[in-house]
Image (spheres, helix red, strand yellow):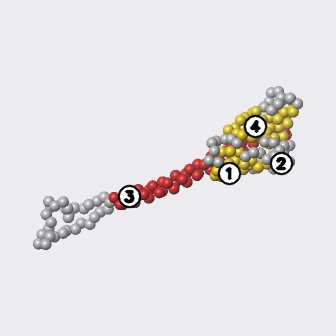
Amino acid sequence: MKFPRFKSNNRNGDSISSNSSFLPNQIYTGFTLIELMVVISIMALLFGFSYASYREFQRRQVLIQARNMLITNLRLAQQLAFSGRKEAGCVTLDGYAIERRSDASYAIEDRCIGGGGNNQIKLVTLPPNIEIDSFPAPGNSVTFYVLGRGISRTSDVTLNLRLEINTVTIESTSVLITTVGEIK
């Protein structure tokens, strides 16, 4: 801030001498302490609000990424079932399943009939603070039958993903699998 230039006279009408500590013909520039404190306070508030918004955005992105990963893996199981590809030792392939293993993981397995058991194709661990709810009864899995014959359920299945921090659900999203095998 620039301070105005002024000329001051003493009682006799003479100008103030130049050896005084205040020079009247000099322009003083700069910011006062109060102006600096106001600017710094405003910047701190803006930073605080923007950081909180960024953290919220980042958490939502992690949940969206986990949902997209679940959809990709459901489509992988569906595609493997459509192709009818059998793993070694599988006599008759019934289909490929997504099975929930824990709150934070699920697996893709083949379902074989007549020997060979169930072979794990892929194990997926969800990002931190993301949990998958239990699958609706019966069981904890959804099987895509071979040759596009639908799924192992008689009604549509909704798989829920939750973002939890300190056991509090912040946000959730879901994926729908219809009885004909459509993934939404």
- Residue 116 tag number: none
Q: CA distance from mark 4 to mark 2?
A: 19 Å
CA gap, disc 2 and disc 1: 23 Å
Q: Residues within 10 Å of mark 1 (few under 14, many from 20)?
A: some
Q: Which mark is residue 172?
A: 1
What percent of the width, then of the height, locates residue 65? 65, 45
* Separation (CA) of disc 3 from disc 2: 64 Å
Label 1 to label 4: alpha-carbon separation: 23 Å
Q: Is residue 50 left or right of residue 168?
A: left
Hey, what amino acid is under mark 4? Ile
The dot on residue 108 is 4
Can I make out residue 121 in this image?
yes
Question: Tag 3 or tag 1, which sits nearer the N-term?
Answer: 3
> In what quadrant of the picture does the N terminus appear?
bottom left
Residue that badge 2 annotates? 179
Mark 2 surroundings: few (<14), some (14-19) or many (≥20) residues within 10 A? some
User: Up-down: is 25 above or below 117?
Assistant: below
Q: Position of residue 136 (x, y in %)?
A: 79, 47
- Give me the C-alpha separation between circle 1 and circle 3: 42 Å
Q: Residue at x 80, y 37 (%)?
A: 96
Sequence-wise, the earlier of marks 3 and 2 is 3
Q: Residues within 10 Å of mark 4 (few under 14, many from 20)?
A: many
> Where does residue 137 sit, x and y in percent of width and height?
81, 46
- Tag 4 and tag 3, C-beta contact below 8 Å: no
Element at label 4: strand
Q: Position of residue 140 (x, y in %)?
A: 78, 42
Q: Which residue is mark 3?
A: 37
